[in-house]
Image: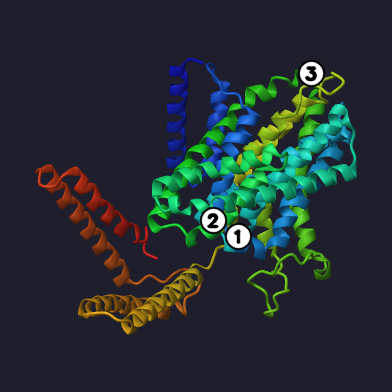
Amino acid sequence: MHPETVLLLVLAGVAVVVAARWLGDRTGLPSAALLTVAGLVYGLLPGPNLALDPEFVLAVLLPPLLYSAALDSSLIAIRDNLRTVVGLSVLLVLVTAMVVGVGFALWVPGATLAAGVALGAAVAPPDPVAALAVGRRVGLPPRLVTLIQGEGLLNDATALTLLTVAVAAATGNGFSTWSALGQFALAAAGGVLAGLAVAYGIRPLRRLRRDPLSSNAISLATPFAAYLLAESVHVSGVLAVVVAGLVIGHNAPYWTSGATRLQTDAVWRLVDFLLEGVVFLLIGNQLPAVIGGLGEHAPSTVVVAAAVTVGGVLLVRPLWLWLTEHAPRALHLRLGAGPEAEDGDPRTLPRQLSGREITVLSWAGTRGVITLAAVFTLPLTTDAGEPFPARDLLLFCAFLAVLVTLVGQGTTFAPLVRRLGLRADAADGARLRNQARVAAVEAGLTRLDELQAEQHDHVDDAAIESVRAALRTRLDRYRRRLEVLSEAEGEIPMSPRYEAALRVRRAVIDAEREELLRWRDLGRLPDEGLRTLERELDHQENLLPSRPA
């Protein structure tokens, strides 16, 4: 493809991604679904098209997306809900793959059990990007966000390992249950070790990481380093990336500067925005390649295969969630105890999910690019040189599962959450944050008392008293806010005086910016000085809530 054509496609893709974000913000529709539809429409038009290269997706697009999601997750929250997370990301993937595989072996002519399991492994792992974007916007409770995040981080490794085993069986290498289990355990354990090696291997670079630019360069390189290390020793690269991201995200606040965190967060938000846009455009763009090979299959066969695949994807998940949550408590794996333990016993399991929560989690199982990347890795022929069983049909079924869940479930997820009334307790979250602010300010006052007791002069005395007065003012403000929040439930109460203060503060910042620009335009302030002072105002404005809270 000519370089100018590539550049034109890139610019058009960025324009579509930005337009989908704008349209999604105004309509409430998830941008992931809008981008998928846009890619699908473009794929039907004449002109240059982009084929999905599974190796490129798995090695280039997936690691940074998984790593960014892991950085944004909570290692403690996942640990507290580990039983449910493991059930969703490992056991549910295996069950879904087997159900789809058995369905293909029984009802789809020309398909084998191994080929069906390979398809099941591809369609089993949900991609939580669309569900999380909508869930955060409508205020999904923190525990459900943690479960969706944890499942999305860990299920890809299970699916890709199972896919490798199923493909080996389908191409003629035979299938051994014990061999498959051993291969899975080795890939998982090796992936964890590789991720830990990378996470702790970059610690000696923490001095460099205090420089924001160096830190960003290291952060962007880390997921690829973890993936390459794991793949070089034939273990799970996906799991290595996730483990590295979780550990680094948990430990980074101890040894990164504030400037580094602000810039790194901005960089990863941009990377997520662009890569997710590219991924969803690619999904829709694969329609011509997917339907091109269906001519050799009877319409009845296509309908049955599609029904088995989509039915397995949509029905197994809610059934699994209901059965695991309603199983006798004595049968539950005690892998972790959540913060919601009822009797203070650290061995107590997290509370049972309600029916509404199970419904939301079931509808959050949207499939994405990992499904298509996985199914496109299916070989064209077996070891005997024969065509891979029903490969074109498997591609179509995987694409249909992605389309149905991403567009169907994605566009209806927000109305479902609102209809069920599942919202985080905003007042409780604000109360907890203010309690933490009070504790932090009190720690600062204690440190001032320690400094006061040390040897110092009158200049230090004046500085200590000035800082102490500012901290006491903040402490009084936080305590007054806590008094208001102590009786609030659900929505955060808004004070007219607080809203007025926000309006006044924003007006003052705008006036300061206008004056700085006037100085620059008159030649009294160089652009370098303007940028320095603008950053100061930007940080002040960033501390203000986007809306009264």
Q: Secondary structure at mark 3?
A: helix
Query: What amino acid is labelled 3 in the image?
Result: Glu
Outermost residue to the front = 455
Q: 361 or 197: which is nearer to us?
A: 197
Q: Secondary structure at mark 1?
A: helix
Task: Please give the residue where the numbered disc 2 appears in the rendered image.
Answer: 249
Rendering coords of residue 172 (x, y %):
88, 28
Compute the Cα span from label 2 to label 3: 50 Å
Query: What amino acid is labelled 1 in the image?
Result: Leu
Task: Please give the residue where the numbered disc 3 appears in the rendered image.
Answer: 296
Q: Residues within 10 Å of mark 1 (few under 14, many from 20)?
A: many
Q: Given contact means CB atoms under 8 Å apart, are the residues at marks 1 and 2 in contact?
A: yes
Rendering coords of residue 253 (x, y %):
48, 60
Going by the image, does 141 lie left or right of 367?
Answer: left
Q: Tell me which numbered mark, 1 or 3, is placed earlier along the sequence.
A: 1
Q: Which mark is residue 75?
A: 1
Q: Write the residue at 30% across / 81% down.
A: 455
Q: 483 or 245: which is nearer to us?
A: 245
Compute the Cα span from label 1 to label 3: 49 Å
Q: Which mark is residue 274?
A: none
Going by the image, does 89 lie left or right of 263?
Answer: right
Query: What amino acid is labelled 2 in the image?
Result: Gly
Q: Is residue 351 above or below residue 280?
A: below
Q: Residues within 10 Å of mark 2 (few under 14, many from 20)?
A: many
Q: Tell me which numbered mark, 1 or 2, is placed earlier along the sequence.
A: 1
